[in-house]
Image (cartoon, coloured by chain):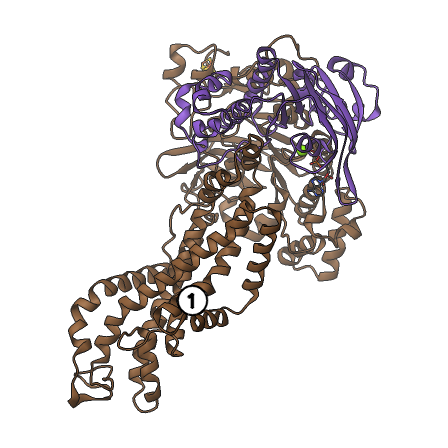
């Protein structure tokens, strides 16, 4: 079973950075304070002491006393509960109103929807504090007015967020499918839209809490909020403020409490939001040092990989002892079903295996140098990588020519003008029509095929010794695919670089490459010259891949051959031949003992008990 | 059913230009063309998902299967809930059988399925809407070839079993030739050639069809792609 689907943003693991820890600790303390504060210090906060009116800090009253002689430290600690509850109420009101406003357009008829959207847009542009004060004044002085006011200030932001998120989901294929099936609008909202936008909305809630807390304090401070005898932090600040020049501590106490709580919620909210976004890739040093005893060095090879293994915690090993080499001017194809470890092999070569994966090898050399000892700069010039999605490699905000020039400026210290000139030349080299004009365009202005050309041109800005292309044409149609394949061949022939071409499509690999390496469940199962693929493939898996490919003369009266079953997941590869459960030739020996990759005639190697 | 004089315009740009195409019951019509040629716009118009002029006559209901099975299933709904959307709960078991998925899959979520299995669920959902026409837009292009074969076999089986009319869209002529009875070639929003599959592939009448044929990757007679 493959696990490649990502159902929306999801909190996988909060990376516990210092700010995240600080945020969590502060929020935790605030929660404790809200629970126990009034119980512990309630009596002290209300004790009137005529002998100690309007005092400054003393050992008995660290933050001083108020006009009735009540201890201000106790009052600050007690006020925590009320302040936090009010903030929570305001946030919930704002969020609820916002979600309703945000989802209304998707259930209302067109005119009503436009009206709501317009209103929300206007409110978003309106200063939040003004909206809050206006609402509070209309709703009446006091805590209720302040809470409603802050709620009103929060609502438009939530509405906008909800609208944006809902619009994304509403544009998805599964909502289109539901509409075609005649599922009613309201049901689409409750079944499809809301469940898929809930998570980011909840994250936003944490951040809004901090804002609400500050906003409410502001309202109380302006006299619009909590009225005596009730008190929250804002009220305490309001009462202490006139005395700030004489006894500043009476105002600083509540101010510090407000600031601390606000910072805590914001830090935690930020950390949660960041954790929900995708985990970034981290470069890992290799687990095993390069060994000297690792077989014969492949004289003249640009890329030498020996016994490469990529492991993830929990026992998943998607790449298992893989070896391959690529000579200058040669294109080697790496082929196999998705999940066989092709992309992780490429990632390991480029030092791009995502955290927390670890890479081990006996030898991993690019142009004779251990990849682990190369600086980012050296690797950046010697290695060009092209991926399936060219947009991921291009910065959408920058013009194409500028991005290419940047590579030469950063890696080689080339002057701006010279770098720009070279960028245009490289764009011309990859046959981008009118390279001068195109270089001044942004990536989104180019078609998919043109973008892929631009990425290849970017790889050519250095002097690449190896070009790794991972499914570079999978998102393109066959016509454009052919053009890009031709270009890759031309670039390799012209520069003498080595090429590693990765694809799940054995026909594409067979047509472009000189040599083909077939991967299954993390291992090489066959290696052969590409021109032997059609007639000379020996491994049952390779043969099954070829058989399942419809050709222009496939017999239409018979069902297409497929491969029954699925490839085992990286953590579930058994001791024997991994292909055994799907193999028609499998014997008992196959599931017990793993066949080694051995020579099968000249220039071919196969790992199968039935082939000899 | 028949698509008559259908056009789709986005502002001043005409994505589909006056297309007329007949899709008889029990027939798979394959639609080929490069990306941007207007295939998806035609498909979406036939399904009523984009504004268009012209008519779609004689199809009771149209259902669609999308290219990306990861994006076309709601990640928070089980297989059974997804299929039941159009068909109702009682039909789930029968539909799973039609697309050759075990009944145990009913309680699973999309993330627990492989790409090919998801695409089967999407087909089952569409069949649950009792379509007079099924539109399949590049439904195998994000699948492994090993899985593509099984999905293509399924599609042909459904045609024979249910007498379904189907518009099968792909940019790969080898795939379309295998699965379709009739092949229509689209170029810049227009149909440039329509005919029986073997004939369009064997004796292409239009230059553009020949270009598409030459672009199909193949193992026999490989060139290494040197000019
Ligand atoms: N919503 C849209 N607005 C403007 N242009 C569009 C829109 N959708 C598609 N197009 C354009 O219509 C043309 C045909 O696209 P499409 O139907 O997706 O073709 P295909 O399915 O063959 O890839 C393309 O040039 C595309 O840019
Ligand atoms: S070793 Fe056995 S199971 Fe593996 S491919 Fe060969 S025959 Fe099949
Ligand atoms: Mg399309």
Say if B145 sits above or below A257 in the image.
above
**Where does the image place residue B200, in percent across and percent down from the top left?**
77, 17
**Where does the image place residue A464, in percent across and percent down from the top left?**
65, 44
Q: Colour of chain B?
A: purple
Q: Chain of mark 1?
A: A
Ligand 1 shows up in which quadrant of the image? top right
The answer to whether any part of residue A284 appears in the image is no
Residue at the spot of label 1? A150
The answer to whether any part of residue A39 appears in the image is yes
Residue A119 falls in which quadrant of the image? bottom right
**Where does the image place residue A39, in percent across and percent down from the top left?**
17, 67
Quadrant (top left, top right, bottom left, bottom right) of the N terminus of chain A: top left
- Chain painted brown: A
Is residue A352 found left or right of B48 in the rendered image? left
**Where does the image place residue A320, in percent across and percent down from the top left?**
44, 30
Q: Secondary structure at mark 1?
A: helix
């Amino acid at each position: 079973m493959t696990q490649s689907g990502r159902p929306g943003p999801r909190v996988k693991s909060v990376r516990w950075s210092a700010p995240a820890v600080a945020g969590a600790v502060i929020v935790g303390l605030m929660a404790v304070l809200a629970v126990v504060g009034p119980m512990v210090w309630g009596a002290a906060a209300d004790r009137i002491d005529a002998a100690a009116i309007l005092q400054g800090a003393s050992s008995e009253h660290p933050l001083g006393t108020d006009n009735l002689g009540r201890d201000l430290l106790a009052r600050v600690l007690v006020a925590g509960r009320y302040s936090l509850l009010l903030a929570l109420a305001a946030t919930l009101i704002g969020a609820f109103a916002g979600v309703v406003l945000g989802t209304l357009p998707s259930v209302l008829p067109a005119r009503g929807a436009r009206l709501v959207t317009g209103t929300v847009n206007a409110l978003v542009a309106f200063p939040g504090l003004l909206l809050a004060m206006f609402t509070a004044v209309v709703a009446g002085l006091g805590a209720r007015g302040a809470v409603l006011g802050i709620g009103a200030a929060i609502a438009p932001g939530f509405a906008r967020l909800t609208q944006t998120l809902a619009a994304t989901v509403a544009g998805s294929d599964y909502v289109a499918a539901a509409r075609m099936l005649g599922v009613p609008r309201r049901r689409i909202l409750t079944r499809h839209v809301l469940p898929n936008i809930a998570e980011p909305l909840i994250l936003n809630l944490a951040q809004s809490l901090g804002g609400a807390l500050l906003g409410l304090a502001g309202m109380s401070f302006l006299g619009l909020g909590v009225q005596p005898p009730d008190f929250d932090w804002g009220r305490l600040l309001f009462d202490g403020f006139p005395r700030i020049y004489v006894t500043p501590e009476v105002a600083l106490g509540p101010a510090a409490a407000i600031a601390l709580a606000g910072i805590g919620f914001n830090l935690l909210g930020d950390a949660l939001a960041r954790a929900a976004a995708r985990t970034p890739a981290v470069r890992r040093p290799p687990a095993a040092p390069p060994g000297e005893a690792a077989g014969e060095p492949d004289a003249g090879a640009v890329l030498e990989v020996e016994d490469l293994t990529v492991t993830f915690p929990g026992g998943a090993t998607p790449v298992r002892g893989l070896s391959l080499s690529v000579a200058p001017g040669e294109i080697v194809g790496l082929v196999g079903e998705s999940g066989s470890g092709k992309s992780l092999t490429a990632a390991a070569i480029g030092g791009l295996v995502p955290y927390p994966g670890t890479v081990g090898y006996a030898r991993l050399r690019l142009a004779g140098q251990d990849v682990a000892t190369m600086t980012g700069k050296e690797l950046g010039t010697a290695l060009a990588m092209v991926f399936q999605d060219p947009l991921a490699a291009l910065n959408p905000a920058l013009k194409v020519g500028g991005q290419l020039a940047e590579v030469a400026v950063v890696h080689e210290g080339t002057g701006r003008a010279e770098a720009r000139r070279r960028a245009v030349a490289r764009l011309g080299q990859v046959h981008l029509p009118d390279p001068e004009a195109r270089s001044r365009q942004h990536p989104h202005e180019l078609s998919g095929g043109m973008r892929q050309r631009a990425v290849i041109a970017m790889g050519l800005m250095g002097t690449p010794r190896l070009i790794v292309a991972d499914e570079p044409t999978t998102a393109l149609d066959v016509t454009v695919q052919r053009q890009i394949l031709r270009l890759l061949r031309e670039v390799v022939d012209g520069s003498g670089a080595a090429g590693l071409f990765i694809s799940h499509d054995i026909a594409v690999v067979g047509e472009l490459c000189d040599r083909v390496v077939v991967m299954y469940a993390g291992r090489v199962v066959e290696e052969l010259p590409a021109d032997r693929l059609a007639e000379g493939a020996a491994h049952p898996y390779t043969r099954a891949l070829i058989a399942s490919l419809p050709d222009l003369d496939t017999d239409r009266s018979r069902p297409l051959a497929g491969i029954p079953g699925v490839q085992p997941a990286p953590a579930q590869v058994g001791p024997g031949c991994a292909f055994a459960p799907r193999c028609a030739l499998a014997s008992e020996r196959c599931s017990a003992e793993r066949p080694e990759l051995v020579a099968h005639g000249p220039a071919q190697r196969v790992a199968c008990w039935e082939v000899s | 059913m028949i698509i008559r004089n259908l056009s789709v315009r986005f502002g001043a740009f005409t994505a589909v230009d006056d297309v007329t195409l007949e899709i008889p019951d029990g027939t798979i019509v394959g639609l080929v063309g490069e990306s941007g040629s207007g295939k998806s716009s035609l498909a979406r118009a036939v399904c009523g998902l984009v504004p268009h002029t012209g008519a779609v006559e004689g199809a009771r209901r149209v259902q669609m299967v999308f290219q990306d099975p990861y994006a076309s299933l709601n990640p928070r709904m089980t297989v059974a809930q997804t299929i039941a959307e159009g068909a109702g709960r009682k039909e789930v078991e029968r539909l799973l059988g039609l697309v050759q998925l075990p009944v145990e899959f009913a309680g699973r979520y999309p993330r627990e399925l492989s790409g090919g299995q998801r695409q089967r669920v999407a087909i089952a959902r569409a069949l649950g809407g009792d379509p007079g026409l099924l539109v399949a837009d590049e439904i195998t292009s994000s699948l492994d070839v090993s899985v593509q074969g099984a999905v293509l076999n399924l599609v042909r089986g459904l045609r024979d079993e249910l007498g379904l009319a189907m518009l099968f869209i792909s940019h790969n002529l080898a795939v379309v030739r295998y699965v379709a009875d009739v092949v229509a070639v689209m170029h810049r929003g227009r149909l440039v050639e329509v005919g029986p599959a073997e004939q369009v592939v064997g004796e292409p009448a239009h230059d553009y069809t020949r270009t598409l044929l030459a672009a199909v990757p193949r193992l026999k007679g490989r060139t290494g792609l040197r000019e």
